[in-house]
Image (cartoon, rainbow, N blue to C red):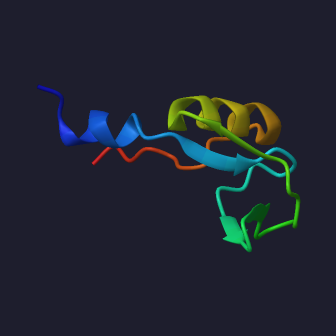
């Protein structure tokens, strides 16, 4: 049996191919980025998205806590 963390991470995320934002909105059947307005939306795992984000921005989106 998988734990909740693994189940949550297996859900694909949708992101903007231009700015990598996860703020994707659907309006009248069209997906678009709420940050930059781009309509080219891609899908991948959260781990893949985090790798893309780190490549482009030279830092992690969320830094892990040592607590």
**18 on left or right of 3:** right
The structure residue drawn at horizontal position 76% and vertical position 70%, both measured from the top left corner, is: 34
Q: Quadrant of the N terminus?
A: top left
Residue 13: image x %, image y %?
56, 45
User: Is residue 26 depicted above or below 43 in this figure?
Assistant: below
The residue closer to the viewer here, 62 or 24, is 24
For the view shown, which residue lies furthest in the front direction? 29
In x, y percent, where is residue 4? 21, 42
Residue 61, position in %: x, y?
A: 61, 48
Q: Residue furthest bottom?
A: 28
27 or 23: nearer the eye? 27
Quarter of image, res 60:
top right
Q: x, y (%) of residue 67?
A: 27, 48
- Horizontally, residue 59 falls left or right of residue 57, namely left
33 is higher (above) or lower (below) than 46: below
Above or below, 39 against 40 in this view is below
Residue at image location 87% in from the left, 67% down from the top: 37
């Amino acid at each position: 049996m998988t734990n909740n963390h693994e189940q949550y991470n297996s859900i694909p995320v949708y992101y903007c191919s231009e700015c990598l934002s996860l703020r994707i909105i659907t309006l009248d059947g069209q997906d678009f980025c709420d940050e930059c307005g781009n309509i080219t939306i891609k899908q991948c795992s959260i781990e893949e998205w985090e790798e893309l984000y780190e490549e482009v921005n030279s830092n992690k989106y969320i830094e892990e806590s040592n607590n």
